[in-house]
Image (spheres, rainbow, N blue to C red):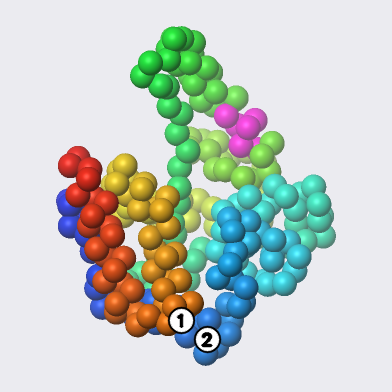
Amino acid sequence: MEADDKTVALNSPGTVQAVKVITDMYRKHKIIPKGAISWDNQGNNKVYQSRQVIFVLNASSIFAHLAESDKELYEVTGMLPAPAGPAGPLDQVSTGEWMVFKHSPYPELAKGFVQYSMEPEQLRMVMEEGGGRWGPPYKGMYSSDFWQRPAFQHWRSMLDRGRQFGFSGTMTAAAGEVLATSVLSRMMHQVLVENIEAEKAVEDAHKKVVETYARYPEG
C-alpha cells in the first residue's frame, strides 16, 4: 500500500519484474527447490534443518529448534539481512501483540497480566529462553550476553530497516487479511503452477487487494 492506506500499489512494472525473477529462479536457474510450491508453514525450517539448503528466508524460529536438536548446525547458523535491491535494502518484520477482548469478564486481570508480562525482566526471560525466536521491543534489552552472540550481529540493523507487510502504508486489518489469505503466494502459484503470465497474475492479485481494502473503510 501507499502511505495513505488507500492506494493499492501492487500492480506495477516492479512487481511484474520481481515475479519474473522468482520464476526464473524456479524454472531456469533451479535454485528454488521444485517442492517449494507445496511447502506448508514449516517447509523452510525443515529443509534447512535437514541440510538440504544453505539459505532460507525465515524467522529466527530455526535457532530455537537447532539449540535442542542439532548443536553442530546451531553453532554455524546465523542471521543475515536480505540482499538489497535497486531501491535499497528492506527486511520484512512482524510483531506480536497482546489483546484483551471487549467483553472479557475480567478486563482488569487481563490488563494486569499483560502489564506483568511486558515488564522488562519478565520479557527478557521469555525472549532469551526462547532461543532467539523473538526479538525484544526494548532497545536496552539487546545489551545482555545472549544478544552478543555472533549469530545475532545483524539483528538490530535488520530491525531498524525492517518493514511490516502493509508498508509503505500501516499494518491495518485490511493488510492483515491480505497477508492471512496468502494473496501474494496465490499470485506466484498462478505463474509457477497454472502457467499464467506474470502480468495477468499481478493484475488479479491487485484486484483482490483492492476488494479487500474496500471492505475496510478505515483501511
Amino acid type at circle 2 is Arg
Which residue is at 23% across, 50% downward? 213
The residue beneath circle 1 is 23
Label 1 neighbour load within 10 Å: few <14, some 14-19, many 20+: some
Identify whether 13 is placed above or below 109.
Answer: below
- Contact check, label 2 and label 1, Cβ < 8 Å: yes
Amino acid type at circle 1 is Thr
User: 30 or 82: nearer the eye?
Assistant: 30
The residue beneath circle 2 is 27
Identify whether 28 is placed above or below 185.
Answer: below
Residue 202 lies in quadrant: bottom left
Local secondary structure at mark 2? helix
- Write the start and end of the magenta stretch as one range: 123-128
Where does the image place residue 44, in percent across and percent down from the top left? 62, 62
Query: Distance between the Cα atoms at labels 2 and 1?
Result: 6 Å
User: 212 or 53: nearer the eye?
Assistant: 212
Local secondary structure at mark 1? helix
Where does the image place residue 219, in percent across and percent down from the top left? 22, 44
Which residue is at 55% across, 64% downward? 57
Where does the image place residue 199, in percent across and percent down from the top left? 29, 79
**Residue 132 located within the stretch drawn in magenta:** no
